[in-house]
Structures are given as structure tokens and as C-alpha cells.
Amino acid sequence: MGLTVLVLPERTGDAPLSLTFDAPRIVVGRGEGCEVRLPDPSVSARHASLRQHGGSYLLVDEGSTNGTFLGDVRLAPHAPRVISSGDRIRVGRVWIEARLEVVAQASSPQDTRELALMLVQRALESSGEDSVPRVVVADGPDKGKRLPLLRPGVPHVIGRGHGVDLPLDEVDASRRHVQITRKAEQVWVRDLGSKNGTWLQGRRLPPDRDTPWRQREELRIGQDIFFHENPALEALAELERYADEAMGEDPSIQAPPDAPPQDFTPPGEPAEDREPPPSPASPAPSAPVAATPRAVSRPAPARTGWGASDVFIVLLALGVLALSLGGLLLVFR
């Protein structure tokens, strides 16, 4: 039995992003080596793990700063909890859903990287920042032109002819001069047999062969000079360097309202055979709640002035004192 992990979206209308695994251990965190990489400062570098246990999976908090929650129950660090298909899990402020199902093809490390970049891209878009990877003409007759690289794995053609993705005015450019392809964070460039050649960092590219084009490297076609940039990749690298953002004891983050239903049943598994959800009486402590204010004892208010009872007590005491003095006089006569 494999595991599909869905990253639930924060914005209404965004589709969940998913990765599929058939591995004994799946690490969830912000760090580069995690199988499920969540680029959010509230997520620790190695936040939690999902471990195979027979035909099921165990959820383990790996000592994270902000805790791992199975539903609304916070897990004790390093204390495994069995999960059921469809359970929703919160790591930091990010919600994911775990589905136990038959795996046809497992996700690759490149898929993990793409998911992280997509999450960063969504965050940049929601804050109004430009997030699209692109090729930019920095100098030459076509200065200022841009070619968005929206879809990974899709080749884009640059040249002087019709029907290309980025048409050029540069007279030394061939009609179909060069092909650009983005794969995760890496951009590849291929000269399509151009007449005057394509130059990368002063070296002429061999025709019909993909060559990695790194950021800040200069690509030249005639007098046109190209660079490529990826705001999401730069933000992802910056997020890796952040310290964990402490969220406090009870952030009360609710699951997204448009999250997939929790009672998902894997194909071929009757609903009644699913493992029941963890009992609230299990040893894992519940999520922290605000402390109930303790009752504070206050002293009785101070009395001001003389009341009737006070006068009566004073007169009675004086009377007793007078009788005592009278008795003493009779004794010593």
C-alpha cells in the first residue's frame, strides 16, 4: 500500500497539489532533502515523518518547533500515531491530507521540487508579486522582451520566424534559432541548427543538444543578450535560510473549507475495514488550550466609621470593666 500526500490550498479555487510514494519513510519539512517539501517558515527543516507499518502508516513529529497535529490533536514529539486514509494533518500552518492507496508510479525528487516551487509561486501571487519564471532580453535590438516559462517540460522556441514563442528583430537570428525548456529549477537551451550560432558565456553551443543554462549566465544571439530568472526559485532558497517562525501555543488554524473530504476510502477497501481514528484518550497530549483563569482571593473591604454594633460592644466592655473595679473595691475595704 502506497501513500498520496495532498497539500491543501489556502486560497479558494486553487487545486490541491499531490505527491505519491511507496517508501518506508517519507519526511515532511522545509528542508531540501524532504520528500514533501513545504516552503513555509512555520514548518521546521525536518518537521514530521510518515512511516510504513505493515499495511498502514504511522505519523511521527520529529521534534518540530510548532508541532504536528492529527486533526485537532497535537502529537507528542517522536510518539508514533497510526493514520487512516483521508486523515488531515497540520504541520506548522500548512494542512496536508494523507490517502492510502495503490501506487502506480511514485513521484520523483524533481516532482517534489516542482511542488515546492509551485507553493512559493502561489504565495508570491497572493501577495501581488511577480512569480513567473522567464527569459529576459537584457540588451540588443529586442531589449525588454520577455518569454514566460510557465509550464515545466514544455519547449519554447525563439527566432525570427512566424509561430515562434519569442519573435526577434535581430537580423542574425535564424527563423527557429534556439529552444528553451524549463525542468524544475533548471533551464536547458538547445541550438536548433542556427546559421550564426548561439553563444553561452562566450562558448558556442553545439547544435541539437541540450545544455544547462544557469542563472546569471549570458546567452547571446547576434546582438541580443539573454538572461533567465525565476522569482520562486530565489524565494525558495531564501526560505531555506530562515529560522523557524514560532507560532505560539494555540494558533487555532482551521483546515481549508474546500479541502477534499476526510472519509476517503481507497479502491477495494470497504469503509467498515478502515482503521478507526485515534481515540481522544490516547497518550498523545491534546493541542494546547488557553489556561483557565484561576480564582484570586481578595481581602474583605476595609470598614470605615462606627456602626451600631460597634457602639454596643464598646459600652458592654466598659460596663464589664466598671463591675470588675467595683468588685475589687469591695474586696480591699
Image: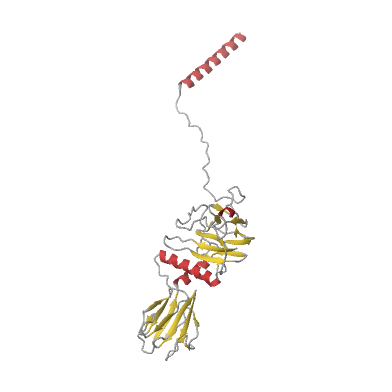
Query: Could you say which quadrant of the image residue 132 lies in?
Result: bottom left
Outermost residue, bottom side: 195
**Residue 194 falls left or right of residue 324:** left
Residue 138 falls in which quadrant of the image? bottom left
Near-viewer residue (221 or 322): 221
Query: x, y percentage for residue 170?
Result: 36, 87
Residue at (53% x, 72% y) in the render: 110
In terms of depth relative to the viewer, which is nearer, 252 or 19?
Answer: 19
Q: Is residue 137 above or below residue 308?
A: below
Q: Quadrant of the C terminus?
A: top right
Q: Is 139 in front, or is 259?
A: 259
175 is higher (above) or lower (below) than 69: below
Color scheme of the displayed model: secondary structure
Q: Nearer the viewer, residue 183 or 44?
A: 183
* Res. 221 in view: yes
List x then y, in percent, for residue 318: 52, 17
The number of numbered badges drawn on the structure is 0
Going 51% across and 19% down the picture, which residue do you hit?
Answer: 313
Residue 140, above or below 25: below
Please state if 11 lies on the left or on the right of 329 as rendered.
left
Q: Residue 135: x percent and y percent?
A: 42, 78
User: Does residue 313 sit above or below 192 in this rendering?
Assistant: above
Residue 78 placement: quadrant? bottom right
Percent position (x, y) of residue 331? Answer: 62, 9
Quadrant of image for the N terminus: bottom right
Q: Is residue 332 visible?
A: no
